[in-house]
Image (cartoon, rainbow, N blue to C red):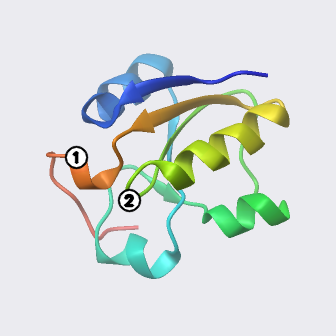
Amino acid sequence: MRFGSIPIRNILQEAVRYGGIIVDVREQEEFLKGHIPMAVNVPLEDIKAGNFSLPKSRFLLLYCTYGGGSTMASRILSQEGYKVINTIGGLVQYTGALTKER
C-alpha cells in the first residue's frame, strides 16, 4: 500500500480536513520537550515492534524531527493497512506553535 505526503506546515489543516490523528514518532523524551498540538506520541521503535494501538479507520498524519523516521513509520503502517499521510521536512521546518501538553 502507498501513502501520501504533505509539507509539515499543512499538518494541522490536513488533520482537520481528514479528521485524522497527528502522530509524533519521536522518542517520548523529545515529545515531552515540545510537540505539535493535538499530537499523540507513538515512537518509531514501538511501531517497528507492533507495540501500539491506532485506529485503521482514520487517517494518520506522521511527523518526526527531520522526516526520515516518519517516512519509515509511514511505510510500515501503510503496509499494515493504515491510511497514512507522511509529512515532509520534519519538526525542524515546522513554524507553528508547539505545546508540552499531553
* The one of 32 and 79 positioned closer to us in this rendering: 79
- Image position, residue 31 (x, y; %): 41, 70
| Residue type for callout 2 | Thr
**How many numbered circles are shown?**
2
Mark 1 is on which residue type? Tyr
- Quadrant location of residue 1? top right
Residue 58, visible in the rendered structure: yes
- Residue 51 visible, this orientation: no
Residue 77 vs 53, above or below: the answer is: above
Viewer-closest of 21 and 31:
31
Q: In this picture, is 42 found above or below 27? A: above
- Image-based side of 68 in relation to 51, left or right: left
Residue at 73 percent of width and 27 percent of height: 57
Q: Earlier in the sequence, mark 1 or mark 2?
A: 2
- In screen coordinates, is 61 left or right of 49? left
Would you name the residue on which mark 1 appears? 94
Along the horizontal axis of the image, is 99 left or right of 56? left
Q: With 28 as the anchor, is 84 left or right in this view?
A: right
Q: Position of residue 40 (x, y in %)?
A: 50, 56
- Which dot marks residue 25? none
Residue 62: x %, y % from top left:
51, 43
Residue nearer the viewer, 32 or 3: 3
For label 2, the residue is: 65
- Determine the residue positioned at 76% across, 44% down: 76
Disc 1 element: loop
Dot 2: within a 10 Å radius of its alpha carbon, few (fewer than 14), some, or many (20 or more) residues? some
How far is disc 1 from disc 2 in space, using C-alphas? 9 Å
Question: What crowding class fits label 1: few (fewer than 14 Cα within 10 Å), some (14-19), or many (20 or more)?
Answer: some
In this view, which residue lies farthest toward the top? 17
Per the image, label 2 sits on a secondary structure element best described as loop
Q: Quadrant of the C terminus?
A: bottom left
Tell me which residue sits at (33%, 42%) in the image.
89
